[in-house]
Structure formats: structure tokens, C-alpha cells
């Protein structure tokens, strides 16, 4: 280890798709890398809604970052909470312990939910970004049925059996789409005070059709699919207020309901604000086409934390492939600088298309001019997601879980630790 | 459901081995059963140490109680926290919601850890009774290695890499036995500041050999096995004090250490005290040979909550088969009373023997006069535990996990959500 003492220090904040790609692309560089993450695992976020609904275990969509990078000897992994970047001192400040110095920094700290000024909604309407979020969502979702079984009035039982998803992006649609099947199939016959088929699933979307970023024909299909699955889609509406026992829409409609999930907006994490650089409205740091800060080519920002121009005014979307591609580009640019080459690579986003799954045999896929829908799109979705799952073992287990759930309609992960009483 | 309105109400507190057996044995009785549990799942407690050490997921050793009893139409399952029994009103009092009336009551509320007057140790030295306990233990165990990687002094790193198990009963031995393998194999090569082989595992046992309840020859074998696995067994000692950074033994030895697990004693849960009946020193309710209270044949206490005389002064041991047998007996006695037959069955414990696993190919089994040890005992242990796991799906998954872990030495469940900073 002493040999590396004089090597440039690269610090990477975040072990998501972007941070991992940056670390990997520096595998052979003569640098000393420290990757810092708030948790100890890389998370396959696209399947987080499956953990939130009891279909998969947390362990099936996560892998320890240090296991992934075990053989990359120039990299040390630290589990710690970064609270700020001090660019003056070239240090990363942790919530506890000494600060960590860097020569080059990659900020890949991801995003959080955006409640548009209503941070008090977070406790009532959790979003889905981390395993902690997903565990909490699962406890709330399954806990609602337990509370319904005990409810002493019909009105209260109805509130417990009403679930609202706010936001019709891919996460919102995937979550809303899976809920009716669980309620009507997985939980059937297990309660004595009601039948789970009484469950209402409501999706609130602020445009005419769900899946804003998809082509129009697929958006119409997706809305129809969700309705067929039993989701009540309320278009052209926003949540005006969220309370423990109801959601108020912006047209004054009051929906009694005890369980709300938030999938309506994203913003960059709080570290971005400490960089002292320009941020967009969602808090993302505006970077150059080479992905570093405008005035500092030793600090890179990538993934959901970055605002990178794409088509005209549009930014590169906050999706896993974009984060991965940015991580590779940032890593390569740092590699060039370390090697004394200041001719940095410009980031060019390769858009491989978008996909969203809505339920059993129902999905939409847009790749270039080709649009797919129904069972074929569902198989494409399944194939891509299994292909990308980090680690062979997870893939095998996830396949088994899915095969089992597909055939039997049952959900594997049902345990609850605490009673829900809110 | 109206037909059953006039049927006698049986309330069962607890969905463990005892409570479930009681419910099942009343399957055909003309009663209306309410089974209440603090959680929503039945737990296969004998494998809890595998969850605590990341070998199995919580879902693999638990099954929803309402799924198990789905087809038993005379039974309703409620997830609620029972805080007291009001025998005067024949009611069970919950932490929230209306009390529940009973005609017959089965208390199968299990046990908690006994800290012998030092309840302040519970936070520092958690035990293993529930999934919540096991999750907390896993976070502490794996979190200690994360903290060691960041430790700024060698002394602090040593503290993080020292693990103490207090108590050499089956749980303590199984836990201590599995730790060296994880440290030396599963985590090998993943840290840059130390090698996991530096880990110390210490087992504190207050007699000369571990496994108090086993025959002497097997106790000697088990102690030798643990030492061979790399566990430092400290015999004839008790913990005199436990602090965040050390454990003090009763001979004044101070062992610097940040992670302690408690497996030294059990006592009955707090509900027992509200029954107004005689309790033994461990808080267990003394019941008749028919398992009901001495002065009340409508209230039964079973499993770890009950003190039932066995050989002379000895009580029936607090193990799963005993709880299951007691549950069947209590259920049958209630069935008799409901049918107007006051000739109750006396409980007779059938001891099928004891087994404990110490590590790969190492176990001890005592059944009557036959004693087994080594690989054959290990296979017997494996066979019995897979056989008894509740539900086919769990069994298959657990087998796969085990086969995988056996071949690769890896632990599947590694994710941590929060940094450990104590």
C-alpha cells in the first residue's frame, strides 16, 4: 500500500450505477480511489418497486459494493455519510470521522424525491429510492391490510383499503400496476373482515396519459393497460394536500385513504448545493460536456446529480444507462488528466430506449422508432432486467422468485415487524 | 359468519410453535378462534442465528400466520400488541383498539431475554428471539467490519474486530460457531485496512463446558469443536459489566470489544405477570398438568411462557417440540370443555432429543442413549431442520442458499442501511 501513497487520490461519492462505472473505468489507472457510500450496497433501483410490494427480498436487488470491487486493488470502499464538499481544502466532509482529501472528485450522489415545497408529505407519502424506502413502503402496504382486518367501522376499513400513487412516471406506473394483482390474487382468502378485491388503487397523473417521457401511442396503451389491471387512473390532476386519512386533489376532490406512495418528482441530493456551482431547478449541478464543473476540471458530477445538456434545452434523463455512461466518461477524463493529457473526452449520451412494465404480460418499450407493447414488450423487459442484475447469484434467485410468483400469484416477502397504527 | 356468533370464543396469544399448534388442533371444533400476534408471521426460531449472520433472509425462516391458517375458516388472525389479560372481564387488552373477549384463552406469548437485573445491557448486547432482533444483530455484526475499515487507530480497529457471545447454550454456540467462518472466508479480500482473519470470536460460558443441557461427552466434543473453528471459549466466567467499548468478566478481566451478543438466559414475556397466577423465577406461569391455571380451566399457558413439571423439580424445556406438544394438548382440552367433556388430558412431554450445530460438518445430537457427533450429526441436524421449516417454498430456497453458501463460503444477505457509529 505504501507504493500508492504518492498516487493521486480519487474520491467517488456514491456507489450507484454512475459511481461504480467511474471506479471501474479507473481500474488500471495509477490512482488511489476511495469510494464512499451512505450504505454498503449497490442497488438495482429499477426493481425497487418489487421490494416495496413484497415480490423480492432486499438482498436480491442489492450487492455489497466491496464485493463488486473486491479485486480492484487500487480502490478502498468506505461506508459513511458525506455531508459536504469543501472545494477550498479539496476535502469531503463526513458526518463523523476525519474529512477525506481528494485530488479528483466524482460526485455521483444520486437523487431524492422532490415534494415541491411540501417536505411534510414525505412521512405520509414515502417515495422509492433506497432499500430503506422500499422496506418502509412494504411495511406500510402490507400493514394497511392488517389494519383493515382490525378496523372497527366500514368507513375506516375503506380508508385502509384505498391506496394512492402520486405520479405516473415509470416508477409510479410499475408500482400501481403490481398492486391490484397482489390485492386480488396474493392475499385472497386470508382475511375474514373483507375480501382483498375490495381494494382500490388510484394513480394520480398530472397529464392526460401516464409515462410522460414515452411516445404518445405507448402512453395511450399504458393508460389503458393500467385501467384493465384495475387501477383507477385520474389524469390531469395533482395532489394539493396529503394528510394521514386523505388526499386532496387540486380540483378539491377529497379521497379518504391511509396509504400514499410518492413518485412525482426527483431532485438532486443535498451534497450538490455545497459544491458552490450552478444548479438547475431540481438542484442538479450544471456541468460542462466533459462532465466537470465549469471552473474546475478536478470535480466531476454525474448521474441523477448532474445536469448535462442533450437536445437543445433538454438534460440527459435520470436513468441507469445514462448514469453508467457518464461514470465511464468521468473516469476516463480523470485517467487522462492523471496521465498528463488535458484533451478531455466530451460526453455523448447513447439513448438505448425506454421501457416500463405495467403488470403480468403488460409492458411498453420504445427504442428509436420501434415501439412494442403487450407480451412481447414484457418479455423484452424481463430479459433486459435479468441481464443487468448485478451478480449471477441474484439473477438466479430473482428468476426463481419470479417464476414462482408468476405461476402461483403469491408474494414471497410478507413479514411485518411492527403493527401499523397511524 | 353469523352462524358462529354464538360459538365459544377462543383467543390465542402468540403465533409461534405453541399458538399455531393450539389453533390447528381446534380446526374442527365448533369455536370461533382469534389468534393475536405482535407480528404477522410465524418464525422458525431455531434458524434465527442464520439471519443474524447474513446467511438467510428473514423471509426464508418466516411465513405469514394468516397464510398458514388461510383455510381454517373458524380462525381469524389479528396483528396486535397484547399488553394484559383481564381475567375478571375475560378480556385481552391491546395496546390500541378495543379489548377482545374470550371464553377460553391460550397464552403462548413466548419468552424474552433475561439480563438478570441488568436491563441496560439489552441495547449493547441484543439477543435473538425475533426477526427484529436478528436484523439488528446482522446490522451490528456486518456494521462492525465497516467501522473497522474506517477506524483511525489500531486499538479501535481491534475493538471493532472483537466479537463476544455471552452464554454457551445452543443459540450461543451456533452463533459463535458460524462467526469465524464468515470472518475468514465470506469477507476475505474485501477490506484494505485489515484482513478479516484478525477477527476474534469469544464465547463466555459460566460452566466448564458449553451446552449445559447435553450429555457430558457431547459437551466436551462441542467445546473442542468450537476451539477448532477458532472460537476462544472462556469457561467458568460470567459477564460482570457490559459497556459500549468493553466487557468486564466476573474475575476482573476487561475485554475491549464493540459487539456483544446475548444468549445467556430467558424469561417469560410481560403478559404472564398480568394473569395473577404463580410464576417461577424466570417469570413462567406455573400451570397444572392439564396446562391450565390452577384455579381456572378456561385459561391455558403453553410453551416458553409456561412452567410445567417434568422430572421431579425440572420443568419441560423451552424448545420448539415442547411448545408444539403443549399447544396440541391445550387445544384438545379446550375442545373437550366446549363439547361438555370435563375429563381433561394430562400433558406428557415426549423428548425426542436435542441437537446443536457448531459449524460446517460439526454438530452434536443426543437422542435417548444415542449420541452423535461430527459430520453424521451435522447431516441429521440439516435433515431435521429442513424437514420442519414451515412451507415448501421456504425449504427449497433455504436449501439453495445453504448449498450455495456451503460451496462458496459466501453469505447472501449483506446489505446495511445505516452506518454504525456507536
Image (tube, coloured by chain):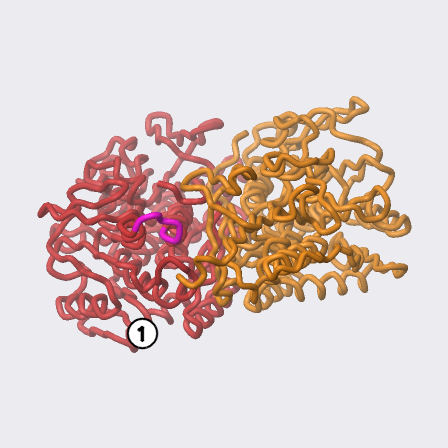
Chain colours: A orange, B red
Residue at 70% from the left image edge and 49% from the top image edge: A291
Residue B97 inside the magenta-drawn segment: no
Q: Position of residue B221 (x, y in %)?
A: 18, 70
Report the span colored magenta. Answer: B148-153
Task: Count the labels in the image.
Answer: 1
Left or right placement of residue A190 versus residue A371 in this view: left
In the foreground, B188 or B305? B188
Does residue B396 lie above or below B336 as drawn?
below
- Give coordinates of residue A214: x percent, y percent: 84, 49
Look at the picture and state if B97 lies above or below B217: above
Q: Secondary structure at mark 1?
A: loop
**Residue B207 location, x and y as percent?**
12, 56
Q: Is residue A324 left or right of residue B69?
A: right
State the residue in front, B361 or A189: B361
B97 relative to A15, above or below:
above
The quarter in which the N terminus of chain A is drawn is bottom left
The residue furthest top is A252
- Residue B303 visible to the viewer: no
Q: Is residue B295 visible?
A: yes
Packing grade of label 1 (10 A; few <14, some 14-19, many >=20) is some
Left of A114 or right of it: where is B143?
left
- Kindly indicate the quadrant of the structure image that contains residue A167: top right
Q: Which residue is mark 1?
A: B361
Residue drawn at the location 31% of the way across and 74% of the way down: B361
Residue B358 spot, x, y in % from top left? 28, 66
| Nearest to the observer: residue B327 or residue A120 | A120
The answer to whether residue B149 is magenta is yes
Q: Quadrant of the C terminus of chain A?
A: top right
Amino acid at each position: 500500500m505504501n507504493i500508492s501513497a504518492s498516487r493521486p487520490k480519487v474520491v467517488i461519492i456514491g456507489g450507484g450505477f454512475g459511481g461504480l462505472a467511474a471506479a471501474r473505468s479507473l481500474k488500471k489507472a495509477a490512482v488511489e480511489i476511495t469510494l464512499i457510500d451512505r450504505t454498503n450496497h449497490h442497488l438495482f433501483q429499477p426493481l425497487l418497486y418489487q421490494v416495496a410490494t413484497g415480490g423480492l427480498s432486499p438482498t436480491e436487488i442489492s450487492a455489497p459494493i466491496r464485493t463488486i470491487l473486491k479485486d480492484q486493488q487500487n480502490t478502498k470502499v468506505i461506508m459513511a455519510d458525506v455531508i459536504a464538499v469543501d472545494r477550498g481544502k479539496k476535502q469531503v466532509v463526513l458526518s463523523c470521522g476525519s474529512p477525506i482529501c481528494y485530488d479528483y472528485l466524482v460526485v455521483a450522489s444520486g437523487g431524492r424525491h422532490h415534494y415541491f415545497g411540501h417536505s411534510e408529505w414525505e412521512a405520509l407519502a414515502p417515495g422509492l429510492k433506497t432499500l430503506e424506502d422500499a422496506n418502509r413502503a412494504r411495511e406500510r402496504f402490507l400493514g394497511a391490510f392488517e389494519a383493515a382486518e382490525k378496523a372497527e367501522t366500514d368507513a375506516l376499513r375503506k380508508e385502509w383499503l384505498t391506496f394512492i400513487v402520486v405520479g405516473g412516471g415509470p416508477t409510479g406506473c410499475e408500482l400501481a400496476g403490481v398492486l391490484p394483482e397482489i390485492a386480488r390474487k396474493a392475499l385472497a382468502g386470508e382475511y375474514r373482515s373483507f375480501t382483498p378485491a375490495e381494494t382500490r388503487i388510484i394513480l394520480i397523473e398530472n397529464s392526460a396519459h401516464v409515462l410522460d417521457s414515452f411516445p404518445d401511442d405507448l402512453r395511450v396503451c399504458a393508460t389503458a393497460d393500467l385501467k384493465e389491471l384495475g387501477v383507477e387512473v385520474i389524469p390531469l390532476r395533482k395532489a394539493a394536500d396529503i394528510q394521514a386519512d386523505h388526499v386532496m386533489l387540486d380540483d378539491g376532490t377529497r379521497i379518504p385513504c391511509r396509504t400514499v406512495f410518492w413518485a412525482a418528482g426527483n431532485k438532486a441530493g443535498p451534497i450538490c448545493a455545497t459544491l458552490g456551482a450552478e444548479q438547475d431547478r431540481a438542484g442538479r449541478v450544471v456541468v460542462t460536456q466533459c462532465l466537470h464543473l465549469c471552473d474546475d476540471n478536478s470535480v466531476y458530477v454525474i448521474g441523477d446529480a448532474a445536469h448535462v445538456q442533450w437536445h437543445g434545452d433538454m438534460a440527459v434523463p435520470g436513468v441507469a444507462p445514462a448514469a453508467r455512461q457518464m461514470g465511464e466518461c468521468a473516469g476516463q477524463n480523470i485517467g487522462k488528466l492523471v496521465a498528463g493529457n488535458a484533451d478531455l473526452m466530451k460526453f455523448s449520451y447513447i439513448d438505448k430506449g425506454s421501457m416500463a412494465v405495467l403488470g403480468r404480460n403488460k409492458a411498453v418499450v420504445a427504442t428509436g422508432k420501434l415501439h412494442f407493447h403487450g407480451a412481447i414488450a414484457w418479455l423484452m423487459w424481463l430479459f433486459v432486467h435479468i441481464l443487468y442484475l448485478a451478480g449471477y447469484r441474484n439473477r438466479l434467485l430473482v428468476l426463481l422468485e419470479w417464476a414462482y410468483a408468476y405461476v402461483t400469484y403469491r408474494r414471497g416477502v410478507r413479514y411485518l415487524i411492527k403493527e401499523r397504527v397511524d
